[in-house]
Amino acid sequence: MAMNVVAELEERLQRYPADRYPVQRATALFHLGVLLTGEKPARASDLLAECATLFQQAALTVEEGKARNALGAALRENGDLVAAATQFRRAADALGDDGIEGAAALFNLALVTRDRSTLEQARQIFSARGARREEAWATRELGALELEQGDMQTAVVTLERALALADVIGDNAAVGATANALGLAYLATGRTADAVDALRRAAGAHPRSIRPQEHAMVKGNLALAYEHAGEVRRARLAAKQALGVPAAPTTVEAQALATLGRLGGPGTGDLAAALAEEPTDEWPHLVREEIARWADAEDATLRAEAGAWTRAQDLARAEALLNVLFELPPEAMERVLAAILAVGSEHTRLELERAAALFHAPQEMRLRDTLARLEERRNSPAT
């Protein structure tokens, strides 16, 4: 679909030469440039520069401002921050400093220049205009910039306000990003328990299956918070879960590995040990996040963790395990179950069957069918 749109816009450029149809050409240039910014920022910059010039020559000031704002975004994407800042300034001048579009240009300018006063100006305009989503974004970025520049106490206040705004607009991605920054601010100001709470909320707002890279980043930060709180097992679990996310950013991997190094290595059996220390209402959260890691883990890691689990499993733990396994796709469920049964005993299997009876009949039948299938596979000469 996108390729069809690109082709159509390219064809419009052929139909609308600048000397005869300047506004029509500028409009096509704008849409094509915006569309190509993510994948081809250099070409997008050329297109949007021509677009801005044509709108300027036609004395269409608002359209010129929008084009320059888009041009700044393309230049930023291409790594030319100085030129991007110039275009964002010109966009703000063209769009005025009292409307949402002008505030958006100021917001973009502040992200490039890292200037708190410009960001605060944009935030105030968004607030005055009732643009709550944009106000939440600007408030979060302001708090993150205050944190980056070492103004920790101010950052805490700003990010708490940003989190409240993110809650109001109901934007989970914004909640996750803001709670993550707030957790780091709490950690920097010695409020370790608050940091743990904020980062746990951030992890929940960035589900592993939906925003995996953000989830991994938050888990790495949560490991640091648990480490500062002296909760070694929780810290190791969080660090291993950060590493267990496929394609986790290299910076996250480095941070998680450093945390594990300080804690004596990854170890095994942290889930079972953590359950022994936590009230049962905390178990679903702990088991869910760790089993997701097991399902993606290498065979040796899965066997080691399964072995530690079977040594601690009882009826309550079997129920907690099944509660999570029933949420998984069939292949992942079978892989984890197969590892547990391979290193466990007949008692391990019987406990799982007894725990399954506590669930609805379709879930119990799913477990029994899966166990029978795994048993048949294990006894098959082909395996």
Image (cartoon, helix red, strand yellow):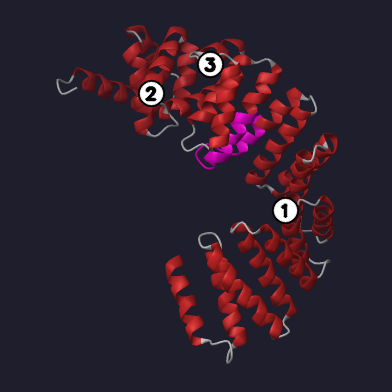
Q: Outermost residue, left direction?
A: 381
Determine the image quadrant of residue 28.
Answer: bottom right
- The reply to whether discs 2 and 3 touch (Cβ–Cβ < 8 Å) is no
The tag earlier along the polypeptide, 2 or 1, is: 1
Task: Residue at 39%, 34% (x, y): give it.
Answer: 329
Identify which residue, 272 or 98, lies in the foreground.
Answer: 98
Location of residue 154 in the rendering, given as x and y in whole percent from the top left corner: 85, 38
The quadrant the C terminus occupies is top left
**Residue 124 relative to residue 171: left or right:** right
Measured along the vertical axis of the image, is residue 107 above or below residue 326?
below
How far is mark 2 from mark 3, CA to CA? Answer: 23 Å
**Residue 143 relative to residue 289: left or right:** right
Q: Which residues are magenta?
A: 200-221
Which element type, helix, strand or loop, lies under badge 3?
loop
The tag earlier along the polypeptide, 2 or 3, is: 3
Task: Residue at 63%, 73% (x, y): give it.
Answer: 49
How far is mark 3 from mark 1, CA to CA? Answer: 38 Å
